Amino acid sequence: MPPRPTDAIIPPPEKIVVTSKRVSCDGGGGALGHPLVYMDMGEDDHVECGYCDREFVLGKLKRNESPYHDPAARPPEAH
């Protein structure tokens, strides 16, 4: 395999600011996405997707968890 050119520009991974320590990622969805995965930051304030390397960073407005990650049924007006 030939060596990689040193002038190749590789963009950094996408950084997404979130308000919840629990996040989900599908790589943007569609044909170029990846399976939907759920991640928890735990004690950290960031987590990285193992598929697409997106980094999810906890913003200043913090909430414990997003209501959309709760598997319990929601009332119709919540949709």
Image (tube, rainbow, N blue to C red):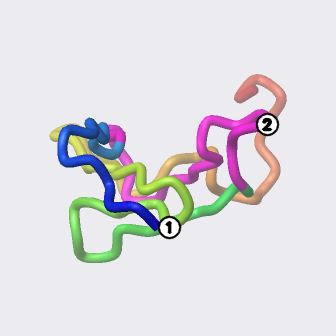
Residue 34 placement, left or right of 11: right
Q: Secondary structure at mark 1?
A: loop
> Residue 44's spot in the image, x, y percent?
23, 70
Query: Which circle marks residue 12 in the picture?
Result: none
> Residue 45's spot in the image, x, y percent?
22, 61
Residue 28 placement, left or right of 22: right
> Residue 56's spot in the image, x, y percent?
35, 50
Residue at screen point 27% across, 60% down: 46
Identified by mark 1, the residue type is: Gly
Identified by mark 2, the residue type is: Ala
Asked whether 21 falls inside the magenta stretch, the response is yes
Q: Which residue is mark 1?
A: 50
Residue in front for this viewpoint, 24 or 28: 28
Magenta range: 14-34
How busy is the neighbourhood of tag 2: few (under 14 within 10 Å), some, or many (20 plus)? few
Q: Which residue is mark 2?
A: 31
How busy is the neighbourhood of tag 1: few (under 14 within 10 Å), some, or many (20 plus)? few
Residue at screen point 75% across, 26% down: 79
